[in-house]
């Protein structure tokens, strides 16, 4: 992880994280063990060598010196002093592939985020399920519901005001990284993961092979948006209950568009700046790209 204190003009490596004891310590300090308990991720693919990957950095809005990072495949770490020291925050996480699933290190969060208004509520879509913390990552609880398809996947989004409400876009499995049963769905919980509801209205349900990567889903107010690896963009304005296909001609999505987070523009479609496009008709009957396009081929909303 790199840090800038001058608005991004220059950067320096955060050595306390780099030299963390779980990575073997500082080899130049004389007390290092050189035992690296961090695993790797195929997302890093470095000439066939799996390397750890930091993909999520979460800053507490109440205190900028308190931050979390999520690392594949190591787990979650927290700093309360602006990155000068780090503590593991993996109690309650389970990694099915480890000899000891509850080991201190070696976990594989795919994406982690929190509720801005209730920052002690953190969520992660993990390689081995969905996990939720309501105590600032001091402990995690597995809240997957495999019977409803909520288990494997990459992205997760959390309501801006209610830390118990979150959305995921489930995938079939690690070995089958595609939509479940050939149809896309978005699942939502409003009770901290004790129950989940799946929504499919407006999403393709036949021959859909989309997968949504870890940064491909976002929420602002009642509006959610995600982009998939097949270049499709979907928009919901009712908290994920119904969806419209907005465009199908984008290249593969690896991160979400920037959704405005100011309350005055949360339902303003023009606040999704990366989602304008022109092109030929795409799949799923999505015909026009000057505004929002529905899965039935119609188009509504402002032209952008």
Image (cartoon, rainbow, N blue to C red):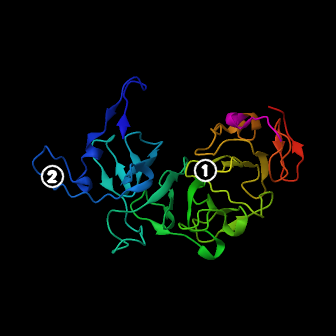
Furthest residue to the bottom? 147
Q: Could you tell me if residue 218 is visible in this image?
A: yes
Q: How many marks?
A: 2
Give me the residue at 56% from left, 66% from top. Answer: 152
Vertical side of 53 occupied by 74: above or below = below
Closer mark to the observer between disc 1 and disc 2: 2
- Distance, label 1 to label 2, CA atoms, is 43 Å
Which x, y percent locates residue 166? 61, 58
Q: Earlier in the sequence, mark 1 or mark 2?
A: 2
Give the quadrant of the C terminus. top right
Q: How dense is the environment of label 1, judged by Cα within 10 Å: few (below 14), some, or many (20 and up)?
A: few
Give me the residue at 35% from left, 62% from top. Answer: 106
Which segment did they paint magenta?
A: 271-280
Give me the residue at 57% from left, 65% from top. Answer: 192
Where does label 1 land, which residue? 161
Vertical side of 53 occupied by 259: above or below = above
Where does label 2 land, which residue? 32
Furthest residue to the left? 30
């Amino acid at each position: 992880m790199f840090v800038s204190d001058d608005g991004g003009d220059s950067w320096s490596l955060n050595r306390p994280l780099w030299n963390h004891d779980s990575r073997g310590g500082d080899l130049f300090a004389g007390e290092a063990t050189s035992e690296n308990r961090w695993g790797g991720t195929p997302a890093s693919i470095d000439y066939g060598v799996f390397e750890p990957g930091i993909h999520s950095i979460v800053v507490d809005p109440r205190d900028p010196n308190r931050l979390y990072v999520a690392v594949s495949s190591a787990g979650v770490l927290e700093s309360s002093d602006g990155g000068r020291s780090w503590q593991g925050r993996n109690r309650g996480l389970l990694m099915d592939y480890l000899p000891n699933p509850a080991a201190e290190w070696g976990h594989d969060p795919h994406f982690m985020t929190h509720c801005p208004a209730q920052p002690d509520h953190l969520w992660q879509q993990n390689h081995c399920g969905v996990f939720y913390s309501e105590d600032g990552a001091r402990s995690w609880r597995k809240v997957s519901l495999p019977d409803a398809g909520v288990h494997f996947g990459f992205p997760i989004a959390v309501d801006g005001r209610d830390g118990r409400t979150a959305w995921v876009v489930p995938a079939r499995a690690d070995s089958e990284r595609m939509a479940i049963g050939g149809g896309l769905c978005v699942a939502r919980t409003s009770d901290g993961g004790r129950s989940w509801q799946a929504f499919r209205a407006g999403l393709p349900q036949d021959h859909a092979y989309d997968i949504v990567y870890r940064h491909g889903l976002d929420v602002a107010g009642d509006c959610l948006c995600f982009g998939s690896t097949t270049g499709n963009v979907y928009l919901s304005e009712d908290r994920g209950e119904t969806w419209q296909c907005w465009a199908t001609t984008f290249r593969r999505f690896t991160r979400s568009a920037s959704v405005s987070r100011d309350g005055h523009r949360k339902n303003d479609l023009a606040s999704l700046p990366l989602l304008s496009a022109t092109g030929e008709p795409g799949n799923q009957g999505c015909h026009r790209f000057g505004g929002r396009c529905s899965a039935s081929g119609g188009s509504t909303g402002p032209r952008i």
